[in-house]
Image (cartoon, coloured by chain):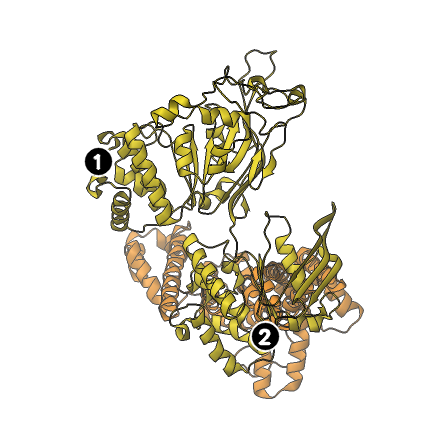
Amino acid sequence: MARYIVSRLAITLVMALLATLVIFLIANTVPGDPVLAQLGDVAASNKEFVAEWRAKYGLDLPLWQRYLVFLKGLINGDLGQSIASQRPVLADIAQFAPATLELATAGFLLALIVGIPLGIVAAVRRDSWIDHLARVVSLIGVSSPTFWLAFIMLAVFYGGLEIAPGPGRLDPIAFAPKTVTGLYLVDSIIAGDWEAFRDAAAHLVLPSIVLAAATLGLITRTTRASMLETIGQDYVRVARAKGLRERTIVRGHVLPNALIPVVTLGGLAYANLLTGAVMTETIFSWPGLGRYTFRSAAALDFPAIMGITLVVALVYLVINFLIDISYALLDPRVVR
Amino acid sequence: MNVAVKPSAAGLVPPVLEVRDLKTQFFTDEGVVRAVDGVSFSVGAGEALGIVGESGSGKSVTALSLMRLLEEPSRIAGGEIRFQGRDVLGADPEEMRNLRGGRMAMVFQDPMTSLNPVLRIARQLVETMVVHGNYTGDQAADRAVKMLGRMGINAPERAIHSYPHQFSGGMRQRVVLAMGMSNDPVLLIADEPTTALDVTIQAQILELLRELNRDFGTAGRSERLLEVRGLVKHFPLPKSGFFQKRLIVHAVDGVDLDVARGETVGLVGESGCGKSTLARVLIRIHKPDAGSIVFEGQDIAAASAAEIRPLRRRMQMVFQDPYASLNPRMTVADTIGEPLRFHGLAATAAETREQVAELLSTVGLNPKAAQRYPHEFSGGQRQRISIARALAVKPDFIIADEPISALDVNIQAQIINLMLELQEQFGLTYLFIAHDLAVVRHISDRVVVLYLGKVVEVARSGVLFERPLHPYTRYLISAVPVPDAAVERQRVHLQLQGEPPSAVDPPSGCRFRTRCPIAQPVCADVPPPLAEHEDGHFAACHFAGEFRPTNGRVHAARHG
């Protein structure tokens, strides 16, 4: 097991290094000379001046040395400076990431908590009303476009029924809890500010439902299909022939096998939610990474885009690593 | 399938299991399939009852019905099952659950899939003992170790903490048996418990079952490796002219064939009768036009190339011409080593070399010959190389298409003996194709006679040569020379008239009728079915056994 983890870890590190290399090379192939852009026409016509600038920023070094410099910067947490905000990219990301983390986690948990039991019950009681319900829920979840669903949710629950709060993380007049983690739910608990907690939780409801919809559908379908496949396996019939109770069979024999594919799907879905919530965040005025990405892309803010790309790559790598590890824990056949 | 019952103290007790008029039906969209239709039997205490039949005859369904483990769309439609006097069909679900795995246990066919892959053996053994309330967790864990030991598993106290994938098929079946026996059942139902195992392991498991039947009460049966039904292969000929109808060669035209594991089936017939085509269709060099080929329970008739690839390792072919079937530009080591690497049986070059050397000595060749080319060998040696190549991937089933007909007579005997030795050593199953009946008689357990793409007779080898039922078979046998000159002179020699008809336009009705001495008008109209005339002896002839030539002349015994 230890050897397996180490080997997975090594592979993940190599992949991360490759990701930085790709990002670095892309940044270097982008047309446009940063020196010229910085100096302006007059200064740029002075060759000596240009050379001095190039030396100053290390642009006269060969490509591989510049890559090493870039890597060294990364290790020290230097992702460059955002053109739009004139702040370090890392500081920007650190500011926007918690909002996304909170939303994506809420959506992901919602998808898991509803999707997995629904899929299980749908499979165990095949062709019952609950199976049909699961089918409808997952169909709607997978097939409704985010912008449409978000609009409908806001129109019905905020505009019409007025039982849900509007966009944003908090009421416009409320104060955010003292920042510790940047996750409002966690911070408000730490601060003991229950009003802020309730407000933040209420604001999470609609966007997390919208964000979770597609994932919920996928997880329900996959769980159901995987359960049905496992239920048809010989060892489940053997378990029945052993005289085990139906509940023991489902919990002890079917679930541990059926949930293996759900883990892969769930992990990737979480990575997807963490990195791809642009639409939901925009509609719900959610100050998260998705909106930061959108803004940076619109402003051609290259350092920011590179920083985000790197973060996305790392999120996927870490989650893939975690999937591999949980695979080994769930399925003894993975580690020989 | 076997149903075994534990001996009870009193001799005169009512049967443990009584099945009366059991009807189990599959309610499919196409209508009701009567899988089990009015079966009755009873099993007394200590008795072992064998239920035998082809695949699809309802053995497994009967077994599942007894345990009431049927799944939709199959249901018990009628009849009565009494277990220890109790009405099984009327039992409520909780009562039924208590019986299952308790007093009534079942061992399924495939040990590879019978155990849950993600749970340790210990857990799977213990849970059934605990759920029936016979043992506490600790007692059950102790007993599980003892049961594994009793089933012949080494170091059971360590083995019990393994996962199923760490065990071989035979060991897993021992675990499954231990599971079935763990609550001291009164009735053990074993559904083909050895079908999925290697022959040598099969023997061990059967022996174990026999022992258990003595000690507790239990037993097995022989099973099919290959099952062919209604196989058809037609080859369209190129059109000879634009307005001409396309002609079709009916090479294989509705062949049924069964091969049991470890058996040698001889396939005989004249040249052009479809023997080689049949062989090539069986290992799916050709795709059949109709029919099913079930190899180890898997229908491969319509399987894709990718699905067949793993099976290629299990079924191998030895070809007729050892001169043509070896690539002249490849060394012996390359020819034999190629499948080893392709199927991932040898990881490194050194491993491949080692296995090639071992294979060469297995077939009686000097391992040092590995680096030589085919042309440096004699015909017999080349056929040994072909056999080594086929053996390399450790197949279960070898189709030998006239493997000796291109060889000198004295070499033929060596190759035949080698094949017999290898069969014994590796538990191989052979389909042996030949036109030389003397050889077929020597090597085969059963013989299938093919004529113009159809099976005309099947029987155990001895029976076929003793009492052939089909006139064509009688002709074939008559053509076999007998070594004893005196006997040879006295023997009736039958000469078959004419050439076999063309497979492009086979005769109507019975295909042999155009050359048959006892043909009647009915033979032209009605194709004779392949009917069982005595136990395991099938013949497709309207007048089976009626052709009995007495001396040099040919005449029919009686008909009219």
**Closer to viewer: mark 2 or mark 1:** 2
Q: Secondary structure at mark 1?
A: loop
Mark 2 neighbour density, 10 Å: few (under 14) some (14–19) many (20 or more): few
Q: Is residue B384 left or right of residue B429?
A: left
- Residue B58 visible at all: yes
Please identify the quarter of the rendering in which residue A99 is found.
bottom right
Identity of the amino acid at label 2? Answer: Ala
* Residue B345 in the image, given as x and y percentages of width and height: 35, 50
Q: Disc 2, disc 1: CB below 8 Å?
A: no
**Between discs 2 and 1, the one toward the N terminus:** 2
Name the tint of chain B in the rendering.
yellow
Q: Which residue is mark 2?
A: B9
* Residue A335 in the image, given as x and y percentages of width and height: 41, 65
Q: Which residue is mark 1?
A: B372
Q: Which chain comes out orange in the rendered image? A: A
Real-space Cα separation, disc 2 to disc 1, in angstroms: 70 Å
Q: Secondary structure at mark 2?
A: loop
